[in-house]
Amino acid sequence: MKQEAILKINKMGKIATIITVIAKICIIMALIGIFAATVAAAFIPKDFLAISNENRFLIDISFSSFGKTLTDEEVLQGRQEVEKMLEEETADRATTYSINAMDINNDGIYIDFTTVGDNIYFNLHNLVWVLLFVLFYLAMTLVTLFFIGFLFKAFQNCKSPFEQNVIKKMKNLAFSLIPWTVLSSVSGTVIRSFFSKSFQISFGIDLKIVMVVLIILALAYIFQYGAVLQQESDETL
């Protein structure tokens, strides 16, 4: 009966290890994709795209920053497409859009219309910072997955769940989650601040992550106590 339980623990550890490896591969692929997007966004001219919303919504796209100009036919087609887009947006939303100015010429596109919403300021350099933060977030996720993988690997190879290696890996996983207690609460305000002209961060503690850390630590110490009892039992026998 005891050996059967150990085999089930080993089997679950093996399955969880495979799932963790797949998750790590997905995160690594996402890291590569986001890194490529970050590099591409960093090389796009800063003034190519700028969007702001401060009582009025402004969209400014400058093709001349790439040394390209629009043909007269493209200008005419662009004006028709923009007018159609704004008509569809007005029909789909309860918000009324009032066009203050619209200029589509050979150098680019400029649209100025009134809307209702929060103040927004965005250009491609904001996007670079957002992508860098996403890279950091994914890197932290990958680190956590490595600690999870170490724990499941220990379960896969253990002869007893009360081995010191298993207990150590549980504690390491709990400690690796501590940065998430702050990072998960900061991420939302950081990304929002990238889309405004002022950079503001509000720190907080994610109690859900705190509870997970405490539960894992509690289980680790319970397993440690079980290891002591098992050792005493083995010595008695």
Image: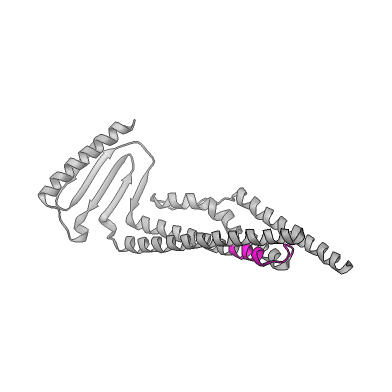
Residue in the image at 74% along x and 62% along y: 3
Residue 89: where, in percent of width, then height?
29, 36
Q: Is residue 129 left or right of residue 205?
A: left
Residue in the image at 59% along x and 50% along y: 206
Residue in the image at 23% along x and 43% along y: 111
Q: State the predominant SS element of the stretch in magenta.
A: helix
Report whether residue 96 is seen. Answer: no
Q: Quadrant of the N terminus?
A: bottom right
Q: From the viewer's perspective, is residue 224 above or below residue 80?
A: below
Q: Residue furthest right?
A: 236
Depth check, front residue: 22 or 191: 22
Residue 151 included in the magenta stretch of the image: yes
Residue in the image at 70% along x and 64% along y: 167
Q: Quadrant of the C terminus?
A: bottom right
Residue 80: where, in percent of width, then height?
17, 41
Residue 77: where, in percent of width, then height?
15, 45
Residue 71: where, in percent of width, then height?
11, 52
Q: Classify residue 182 by image quadrant.
A: bottom right
What residue span does the magenta drawing correspond to?
149-162
Q: From the viewer's perspective, is residue 43 above or below residue 202?
A: below
